[in-house]
């Protein structure tokens, strides 16, 4: 376990009353709560916990999430790309890291030298990874990925014996350690779907083949949804992503034991009153039905507020403690909120607006945004762009463990 270091995002906050133009507040206390909950479930089945921090920790900051997760008892980290794995190493994080999505001609020597576990799905990938291990002068820890029915990455059953032959040969000659056999579920977020058991059964066959060669690898299959709903599939390691960020893939937010980690806020740049009949934003898709107070919020689709947010005119944000509609088209850098008739709501330039958050303040959640937009909360949080400053409340305020 690495030493606990100061959170890289801590101290980035201005005075809480002011705050930046736009911020994604990252509650690392909630991360720790979620990881303790998930690793408690996994531990109950004797499984270790891998926390997935790909895509910059689902938009929350990979390094800070990794540190918070490791502090709270995570055993391993998982990422999609080598760049993501190497960035964790460059930040001084020395916990086991698995990287799983590669081109066959990537710099595997650098990854092996950095002690990154590598997933392979084909003989071609394995040969490239083994060449990297020889160049690095140390064995690579392999996670052989079986395609058990997602038909995305992973080795199909017909090619599995050949891949295992090559991996066993590499283990015998010391180029590799056959650390794990694993797979990924297609429909874990639909508990009871028969494909889940079918995939688990195919994974068992793939593992049996490896055990038949005298090797006993770790086995992992469960993502967040299966971690939450299928203790029998925890196996040796669970790979928890979205649940770490407090977004439940199976339960509604109000029924979830998880705590959302990200709150996106902006501050009002301008407040004005327009007359009845005035059109608002490009295309004048919304026309003031009477004299209206409008608040201009300086976040737009370049910040990750989807332009289609207002297609149905139902997107709402929290302004001055009230749930108010976004009106007119969302632009690249800004959108407009209808604050009602003059005098209805006490609202001023500089006030904070909550776009989505924990659901405990009266504002919308990432789940509600996703529902409005016909997508999933994963896409909402990972879509918040780099222009939105990530801030971390000092521990003891929002970051406090509850
Ligand atoms: C992203 C990912 C996960 C995590 O999935 P969640 O649904 O976010 O828990 C696990 N395994 C693999 C292979 C992934 O790509």
Image (cartoon, grey):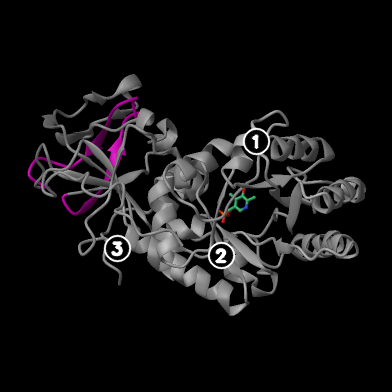
Quarter of the figure with residue 23: top left
Indicate which label's residue lies in the foreground, 1 or 3.
1
Q: Which residues are magenta?
A: 320-345
Please report the residue visible at 87 percent of the width from the left and 62 percent of the height from the top. Answer: 205
**Residue 135 in picture, x, y percent from top left:** 69, 34
Please report the residue visible at 14 percent of the width from the left and 41 percent of the height from the top. Answer: 341
Say the numbered circle drawn on residue 372: none
Left or right: residue 185 compared with residue 370: right
Indicate which label's residue lies in the foreground, 1 or 2.
1
Quarter of the image where the C terminus is located: bottom left
Q: Is residue 13 magenta?
A: no
Q: Secondary structure at mark 2?
A: strand
Left or right: residue 36 compared with residue 278: right
Say the numbered circle drawn on residue 49: 2
Q: How packed is label 1: few (under 14 Cα within 10 Å), some, or many (20 or more)?
A: many
Gap between marks 2 and 3 measured at Cα: 28 Å
Q: Earlier in the sequence, mark 1 or mark 2?
A: 2
Which residue in the structure is indicated by mark 1? 109
**Residue 282 in picture, x, y percent from top left:** 32, 21
Please report the residue visible at 18 percent of the width from the left and 36 percent of the height from the top. Answer: 295
Q: Earlier in the sequence, mark 2 or mark 3?
A: 2
- The answer to whether the residue labelled 1 contacts the one labelled 2, judged by CB atoms less than 8 Å apart, is no
**Residue 364 in picture, x, y percent from top left:** 34, 53
Say the numbered circle drawn on residue 360: 3
Q: Main secondary structure of the magenta part?
A: loop
The residue at label 1 has a CB less than 8 Å from ligand 1:
no
Q: Is residue 341 magenta?
A: yes
């Amino acid at each position: 376990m690495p030493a606990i270091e100061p959170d890289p995002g801590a101290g980035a906050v201005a005075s809480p009353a002011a705050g930046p133009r736009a911020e994604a507040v990252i509650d690392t206390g909630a991360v720790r709560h979620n990881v303790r909950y998930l690793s408690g479930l996994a531990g109950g089945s004797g499984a270790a916990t891998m926390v997935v921090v790909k895509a910059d920790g689902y938009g929350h900051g990979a390094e800070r999430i990794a540190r918070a997760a490791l502090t709270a008892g995570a055993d391993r980290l998982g990422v999609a790309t080598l760049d993501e794995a190497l960035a964790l190493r460059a930040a001084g994080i020395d916990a086991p890291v698995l990287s799983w999505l590669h081109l066959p001609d990537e710099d595997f020597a650098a990854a092996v030298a950095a002690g990154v576990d590598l997933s392979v799905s084909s003989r071609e990938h394995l040969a490239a990874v083994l060449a990297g291990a020889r160049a690095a002068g140390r064995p690579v820890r392999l996670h052989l990925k079986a395609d058990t029915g997602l038909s995305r990455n992973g080795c199909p059953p017909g090619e599995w014996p050949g891949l295992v032959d090559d991996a066993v040969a590499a283990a015998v000659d010391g180029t590799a350690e056959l650390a794990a056999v694993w797979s990924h579920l297609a429909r874990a977020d639909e508990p009871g779907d028969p494909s889940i058991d079918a995939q688990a059964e195919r994974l068992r066959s793939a593992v049996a083949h490896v055990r038949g060669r005298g090797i006993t690898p770790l086995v992992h299959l469960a993502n967040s949804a299966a971690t939450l709903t299928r203790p029998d599939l925890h196996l040796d390691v669970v790979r928890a992503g979205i649940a770490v960020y407090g977004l439940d893939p199976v339960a509604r937010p109000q029924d979830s034991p998880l705590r959302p980690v990200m709150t996106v806020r902006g501050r009002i740049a301008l407040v004005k009153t327009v007359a009845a009949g005035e059109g608002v934003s490009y295309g004048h898709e919304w026309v003031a039905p009477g004299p209206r107070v409008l608040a201009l919020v300086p976040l737009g689709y370049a910040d990750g507020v989807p332009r289609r947010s207002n297609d149905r005119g139902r997107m709402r944000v929290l302004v001055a403690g009230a749930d108010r509609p976004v009106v007119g088209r969302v632009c690249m850098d800004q959108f407009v909120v209808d604050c009602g008739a003059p005098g209805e709501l006490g609202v001023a330039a500089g006030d904070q607006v909550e776009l989505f958050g924990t659901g405990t303040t009266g504002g919308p959640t990432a789940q509600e945004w996703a529902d409005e937009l016909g997508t999933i909360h994963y896409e909402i949080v990972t879509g918040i762009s780099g222009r939105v400053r990530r801030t971390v409340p000092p521990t003891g305020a929002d970051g406090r463990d509850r």
